[in-house]
Image (tube, rainbow, N blue to C red):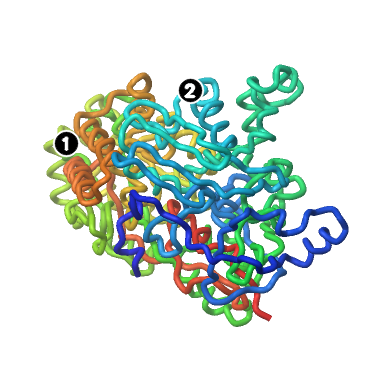
């Protein structure tokens, strides 16, 4: 499959246009419910709601029919990304369905400068927000001038919009043409725009959100004072207009969007038991027969409090397509057993991850004694050698997988054998020798090693057990294995918000999470680079140093500073082969440092899909950077009779 071998970089630095099938004199068609509103005079005719040149999408299997409801499940009150995955981030660019490159999306086409520092986007004339107001270059200018470059709104601008230490700038050419400019070449910008975290340029409608901005509303303080739970205009803005990755993005039904479906009712909030979204009557895509998309009328997402409840809903046939939170391979037998009765098929999800569980030893530990011990590479080697990965794979993962650390999968062009396979053998004798030599030879009455200050060498670890019970099982096995080398491990399951708050506060010995970067190493480098404030758990203060340009956080190690320099060079390099060579250097330094270790190469995942649902691929990449199933265009899914 091409997405297992491709390199995630721009398709071309030249002008790239969407493949448009001229509709010409065809009559556009629309959903019956919208036609009724047109007849009643409450909605403009379909040709007045579409752009002058809507994007024409070729369905995977066949032109569909209108109607129906797509059912999914959300996990509690903080599962906003499950909504994003099916609605799909409607950015300027998007991924091809096979994850092989990017194509125009909200933008009709683009050109880039010869050095890759400027990108001119051509927007679709006549395109509208979900409330019928025009979408133009002014909306992007609003983001760049009034939000991105506003220190109150962004004290530190998102790194994806900062190059050479300077924030992205914009120049309006005309209402439908805009130039985005950087201080230096940015070879990965077009692929960055296709990821789920780079939709901001087209996320906010100026005509609506300007009411929450002091530049446009002189009475903004009165609104702040009248609103509970906000302290300033930035909080008020985010409450009403949402953020790119937060529950509040889906909490306000009045906020205009460019999405195929728009939230209704009370939206998604802490007390939600169900989230309902209805088709956007102004959505800007049509199929090859001129039918306005989406085909499906309604998205209905129930809210469950644990993953097992979702599994039961899937088995009962109450989920139409989903792998999120039910993709554990342990569920595959029960899915297979109940597929006929539940009216679904098993959905094959190609795992883009590198490892099922990565262990991020905290290089920036607040305790100076623990920090010194953790920063000793021989200690980290010993801890890795003290894990019997084969035992964990057999017991927890039903024998599916192989001992693995982190990094690109073996069939990827950036595969680094050392990064993936070093120190994965089980060798407790060698581990004990290394720990003795590291000055940790003294033990207490229970056989546990003592730190230099006399305390027991103990790791206290939190994990998100509701979402990933396999991590708890793996940690329990590691606890017994590390006991043999004199290291104590205590683990406890916590709710996701607690997990994140402790990690962001740098109050952890080590953190565990799934390791990305198996198929998307250049897009998800958070385990080898200190770049992600909610995922590079081995070095959160280093991340803050990088994001702030050295004004906050803690100066990284020399090895990390070198990698961050290389990363900046990689992002600027327009030549694909040279860029790959730069990333190979990053991986080699990470392999030599061994800051993060893993358990098993991530096996493919499972999901369920209604047997009657059409235009769904047989296999879908499972990745956050390819927020599945969004790039397969759920707006083209439909139900067969």
User: Residue 515, relative to residue 144: is it above or below?
Assistant: below
- Whether residue 23 can be seen here: yes
Whole-percent x and y of residue 447?
25, 42
Q: Nearer the viewer, mark 1 or mark 2?
A: 2
Q: Determine which residue is flagged by label 2.
A: 155
Decide which of 31, 387 is in the foreground and name it: 31
Residue most toward the front?
A: 25
User: Residue 36, relative to residue 512: is it above or below?
Assistant: below
- Whether residue 304 can be seen here: no
Q: Earlier in the sequence, mark 1 or mark 2?
A: 2
Q: Determine which residue is flagged by label 1.
A: 441
Q: How many marks?
A: 2
- The secondary structure type at the circle numbered 2 is loop
Decide which of 528, 288 is in the foreground and name it: 288
- The secondary structure type at the circle numbered 1 is loop
Whole-percent x and y of residue 551?
36, 19
Marks 1 and 2, how far apart in space?
A: 47 Å
What is the quadrant of residue 366 in the picture?
A: top left
Decide which of 290, 455 is in the foreground and name it: 290
Q: Quadrant of the C terminus?
A: bottom right
Whole-percent x and y of residue 167?
41, 28
Decide which of 320, 92 is in the foreground and name it: 92
Whole-percent x and y of residue 79?
58, 49
Q: Residue at x 31, y 37 (%)?
A: 185
Q: Quadrant of the N terminus?
A: bottom left
Q: Residues within 10 Å of mark 1 (few under 14, many from 20)?
A: some
């Amino acid at each position: 499959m091409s997405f297992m071998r491709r390199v995630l970089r721009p398709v071309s630095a030249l002008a790239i246009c969407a493949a448009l099938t001229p509709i010409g004199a065809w009559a556009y068609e629309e959903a019956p419910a919208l036609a009724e509103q047109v007849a009643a005079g409450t909605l403009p005719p379909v040709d007045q709601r579409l752009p002058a040149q809507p994007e024409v999408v070729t369905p995977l299997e066949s032109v569909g029919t209108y109607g129906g409801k797509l059912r999914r499940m959300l996990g509690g009150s903080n599962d906003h990304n499950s909504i994003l995955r099916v609605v799909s981030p409607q950015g300027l660019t998007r991924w091809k369905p096979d994850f092989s490159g990017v194509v125009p999306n909200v933008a009709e086409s683009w050109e880039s400068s010869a050095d890759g520092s400027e990108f001119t986007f051509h927007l679709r004339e006549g395109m509208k927000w979900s409330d019928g107001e025009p979408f133009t270059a002014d909306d992007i200018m609003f983001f760049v001038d009034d939000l991105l470059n506003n220190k109150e709104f962004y004290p530190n601008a998102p790194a994806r919009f900062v190059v050479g230490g300077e924030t992205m700038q914009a120049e309006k050419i005309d209402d439908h043409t805009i130039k985005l400019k950087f201080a230096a070449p940015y070879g990965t910008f077009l692929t960055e725009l296709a990821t789920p975290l780079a939709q901001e340029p087209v996320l906010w409608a100026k005509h609506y959100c300007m009411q929450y901005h002091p530049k446009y509303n002189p009475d903004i303080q009165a609104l702040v004072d009248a609103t509970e739970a906000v302290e300033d205009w930035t909080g008020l803005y985010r409450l009403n207009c949402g953020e790119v990755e937060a529950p509040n993005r889906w909490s306000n039904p009045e906020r205009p969007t460019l999405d195929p479906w728009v939230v209704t009712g009370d939206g998604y909030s802490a007390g939600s038991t169900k989230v309902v979204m209805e088709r956007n009557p102004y959505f800007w895509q049509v199929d090859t027969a001129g039918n306005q998309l989406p085909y499906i009328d309604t998205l209905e997402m129930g809210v469950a409090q644990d993953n097992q409840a979702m599994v039961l809903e899937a088995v009962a046939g109450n989920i139409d397509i989903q792998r999120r939170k039910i993709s554990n391979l342990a569920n595959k037998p029960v899915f297979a057993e109940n597929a006929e009765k539940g009216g679904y098929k098993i959905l094959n999800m190609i795992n883009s991850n590198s490892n099922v569980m990565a262990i991020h030893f905290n290089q920036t530990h607040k305790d100076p004694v623990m920090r010194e011990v953790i920063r000793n590479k021989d200690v980290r080697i010993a801890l890795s050698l003290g894990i019997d990965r084969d035992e964990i794979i057999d017991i927890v993962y039903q024998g599916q997988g192989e001992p693995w650390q982190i990094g690109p999968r073996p069939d990827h062009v950036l595969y680094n054998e050392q990064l993936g396979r070093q120190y994965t053998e089980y060798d407790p004798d060698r581990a004990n020798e290394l720990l003795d030599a590291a000055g940790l030879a003294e033990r207490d009455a229970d056989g546990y090693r003592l730190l230099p200050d006399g305390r027991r060498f103990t790791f206290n670890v939190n994990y998100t057990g509701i979402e990933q019970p396999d991590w708890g099982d793996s940690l329990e096995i590691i606890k017994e294995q590390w006991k043999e080398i004199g290291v104590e491990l205590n683990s406890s399951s916590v709710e996701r918000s607690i997990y994140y708050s402790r990690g962001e506060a740098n109050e952890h010995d080590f953190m565990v999470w799934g390791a990305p970067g198996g198929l998307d190493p250049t897009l998800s480098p958070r385990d080898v680079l200190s770049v992600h404030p909610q995922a590079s758990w081995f070095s959160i203060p280093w991340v803050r140093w990088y994001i702030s340009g050295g004004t906050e956080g803690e100066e990284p190690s020399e090895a990390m500073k070198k990698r961050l320099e290389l990363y900046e060079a990689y992002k600027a390099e327009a030549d694909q082969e040279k860029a790959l060579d730069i990333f190979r250097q990053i991986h080699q330094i990470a392999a030599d440092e061994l800051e993060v270790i893993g358990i098993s190469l991530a096996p493919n995942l499972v999901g369920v899909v209604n047997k009657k649902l059409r235009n769904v691929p047989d296999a879908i990449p499972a990745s956050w950077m390819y927020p599945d199933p969004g790039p397969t265009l759920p707006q083209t899914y439909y139900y067969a009779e």
